[in-house]
Image (cartoon, rainbow, N blue to C red):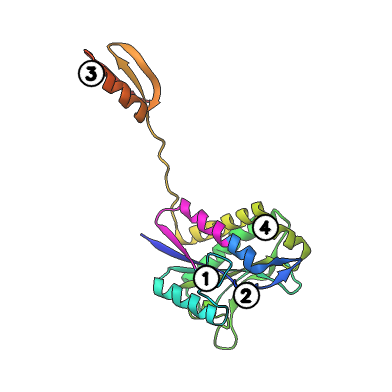
Amino acid sequence: MSLLICIDPGHGGPDTGATGFGLREADIVLQLAELVGEKFNRYEGVAVTFTRNKNTSSSYPGPPEGLRKRIAYANNKNADLFLSLHCNAGGGSGFESFIAKGAPARTQRIQRAINDQVLLYLKGYGIGPHGNPAKVDSQAARSRIAVLRDTKMSAVLLENLFIDNAKENKMLRDRRFLDGLAGAIVKGIAVALGLKEKVNKPKPMYRVMVDGKEIVDTAYESIILEKVKEAVNKKTKEIRLYRL
Ligand SMILES: [Zn+2]
């Protein structure tokens, strides 16, 4: 199984996104996107790609062309999930997420699982949802958010707090807070998609006995190999290896 997650830090380049207290949405969501990307490393069979990885839109001159290019990029890559990261503004508070109108059950499940994890995390900071956190984007028959409407894969857009809310602005400046937020987002996706954590098997250690004498107590393979070679080169009768 191999899954490709396309992470889309909103805005970029000349498009700063929303601003608040000197903070730019484009910068914050880029940081968040990088943290989210890193967190997927701990899961098996997942690869990530980004619609931008610098705060430039050199290849994406900014919406609306930028959005079209991002959508085309994800579609051409055949990504399995499009995750668009934004911050809200306009005098509210809290977290919310959007999926397209008519999005399939898989997408709804991913949205719900992200919301569950993120809201649990935010609770610890006294921050709640912005109204109903699981929003379905629609304007009459169509979704109005292009990245949700025109991407071919499951697509979820997250509005990560309000950049123009004093308390939330402060949180967004805190790298540790962002790291935890990224962890919650990725955990939600992992739950929804049944991702498995990589298993780090502990390396075995050995004890080496040469002709009844303990040469090495507890050591890794690289160390004992040398000792065994030395013993082999001498007139050794018996080499015993104990796996610990
Ligand atoms: Zn935005």
- Compared with 171, 51 (above or below) is below
1 and 4 marks in contact (CB < 8 Å): no
**Comes first in the chain, label 4 or label 2:** 2
Which portion, as a residue range, is magenta?
A: 33-50
Residue 102 vs residue 149, the one in the foreground: 149
- How many neighbours does mark 3 have within 10 angstroms: few (below 14), some (14-19), or many (20 or more)? few
Residue 212 point in image, percent of width and height: 30, 11
* Secondary structure of the residue carrying numbered label 1: helix
Residue 129 point in image, percent of width and height: 68, 66
Q: Do we see residue 59 in this rendering?
A: yes
Q: Which residue is mark 1?
A: 108
Could you tell me the amino acid type at mark 3?
A: Asn
Image depth: mark 1 or mark 4 in front: 4
Q: Which residue is mark 3?
A: 233
User: Mark on residue 14?
Assistant: 2
- How many neighbours does mark 2 have within 10 angstroms: few (below 14), some (14-19), or many (20 or more)? some
Image depth: mark 3 or mark 1 in front: 3
* Secondary structure of the residue carrying numbered label 2: loop
